């Protein structure tokens, strides 16, 4: 039985029980139970709280919920570890959440909890960082992984003149999206940039101070380093902060994935020439619409399913139940003033 079938079997059972309950207790005459308000309940579980990137994505989900007549509750751990996410998944299921939207800190560690939640009738949507496909109904991907990897390599190559040593400052060592992008960046470097050498990959655990310290250590360990790619919004901001007040400003390129509001001062002071991202608000917005379509039975998360996502338009579910938001966007001094997130 597929993941989707397990969940919809559970939903059918729950619907039967609910129907029997309404027969016994009666309704208010307009098709809703006397005690219910008809709202769709969505639980938003980012990797960790207090992260500006996820603050923005939750804001997008809340905007979508307002249009859908749904409610969104954001919950999550203070630290980005998979074990810390499990209790929040369990609680969402116990409280009867219609849908759970989660950015996974590990591809497999939260699967058991997600499967239990699905068995209780909760629609499971991952976004930003995926689990193994069998652990969820849909994955809302910020962009094609190969495209995300390619744009970061292109930017660092342009900024260092196509040759020299570079390093990668990642998030957690087991972060699904980070590791996929890093592997694809390595392939892109090998295939198209023979004069650029990746000399080190380090992990800042999506913690500002740890990422700051890892940047300092990289620059001390590799005196010929010409560029740092950080495919994480926490990491790129911490790396830029370190470089901005150091002897390496103007000498070592810092690029990767960041938000305009985090990176604006570093672009304006010349520390960072260009970086990329998608709009995390749109990512959360799309995830909420997808969750509503799943929970409402409009789609089952199968390849070829289509649904409408408000201002973003229509989307089609792709292979492995993946929905792509769109292409990454480059931010630089010419356009960063046009964005506020």
Image (cartoon, rainbow, N blue to C red):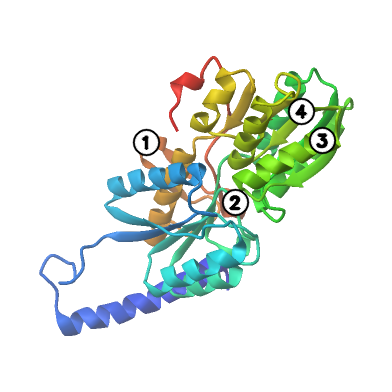
In the image, residue 274 above or below residue 20? above
Q: Is disc 3 surrounded by few (<14), some (14 to 19) or many (20+) residues within 10 Å?
A: few
Q: Between label 3 and label 4, give the one nearer the viewer.
A: 3
Mark 2 or mark 3, which has the lower sequence index? 2
The N terminus lies in quadrant: bottom right
Q: Are marks 2 and 3 in contact (CB under 8 Å)?
A: no
Mark 3 or mark 4, which has the lower sequence index? 3
In the drawing, does residue 20 fall left or right of residue 296? left
Q: Between label 2 and label 4, give the one nearer the viewer.
A: 4
Looking at the rendered structure, which numbered label has been put on residue 311? 1
Q: Label 3, on which residue?
A: 220
Mark 4 or mark 1, which has the lower sequence index? 4
Q: Residue at x 54, y 24 (%)?
A: 265
- What element does badge 3 sit on? helix
Residue 214 or residue 278, whichever sits in front: 214
How far, Cα to Cα, is label 3 from label 4? 13 Å
Looking at the rendered structure, which numbered label has been put on residue 11? none
- What element does badge 2 sit on? loop
Looking at the rendered structure, which numbered label has been put on residue 227? 4
Q: Quadrant of residue 311?
A: top left
Q: Between label 3 and label 1, give the one nearer the viewer.
A: 3
Q: Position of residue 244 (x, y in %)?
A: 64, 26
Q: Are marks 2 and 4 in contact (CB under 8 Å)?
A: no
How far, Cα to Cα, is label 3 from label 1? 47 Å
Residue sticking out furthest to the top: 334
Q: Position of residue 106 (x, y in %)?
A: 64, 60
Q: Label 2, on which residue?
A: 129
Mark 3 or mark 1, which has the lower sequence index? 3
Q: Between label 2 and label 3, give the one nearer the viewer.
A: 3
- What element does badge 4 sit on? strand
């Amino acid at each position: 039985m597929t993941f989707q079938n397990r969940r919809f079997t559970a939903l059918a059972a729950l619907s039967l029980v609910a129907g029997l309950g309404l027969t016994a207790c009666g309704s208010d005459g307009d098709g809703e139970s006397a005690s219910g308000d008809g709202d769709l309940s969505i639980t938003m579980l980012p990797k960790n709280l207090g992260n500006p990137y996820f603050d923005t994505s939750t804001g997008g989900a809340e905007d979508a919920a307002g249009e859908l007549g749904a409610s969104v509750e954001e919950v999550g751990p203070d630290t980005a570890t998979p074990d810390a996410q499990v209790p929040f998944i369990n609680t969402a299921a116990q409280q009867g959440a219609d849908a759970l939207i989660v950015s996974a800190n590990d591809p497999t560690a939260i699967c058991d909890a997600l499967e239990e939640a699905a068995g209780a009738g909760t629609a499971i949507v991952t976004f930003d960082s995926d689990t193994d496909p069998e652990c969820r109904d849909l994955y809302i991907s910020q962009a094609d992984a190969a495209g995300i990897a390619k744009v970061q390599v292109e930017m660092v190559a342009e900024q260092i003149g196509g040759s020299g040593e570079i390093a990668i400052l990642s998030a957690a060592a087991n972060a699904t999206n980070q590791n996929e992008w890093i592997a694809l960046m390595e392939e892109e470097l090998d295939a198209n940039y023979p004069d650029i050498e990746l000399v080190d990959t380090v992990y800042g655990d999506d913690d500002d101070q740890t990422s700051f310290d890892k940047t300092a250590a990289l620059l001390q360990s590799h005196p010929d380093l010409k560029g740092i790619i950080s495919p994480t919004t926490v990491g790129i901001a911490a790396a830029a902060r370190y470089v901005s007040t150091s002897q390496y400003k103007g000498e070592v390129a810092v690029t990767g994935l960041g938000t305009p509001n985090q990176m604006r001062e570093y672009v304006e002071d010349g520390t960072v020439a260009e970086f990329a991202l998608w709009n995390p608000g749109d990512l959360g917005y799309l995830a909420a619409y997808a969750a509503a379509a799943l929970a409402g039975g409009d789609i089952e998360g199968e390849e070829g399913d289509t649904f409408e996502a408000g201002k973003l338009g229509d989307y089609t579910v792709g292979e492995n139940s993946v929905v792509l938001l769109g292409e990454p966007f480059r931010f630089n001094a010419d356009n960063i003033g046009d964005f506020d997130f």
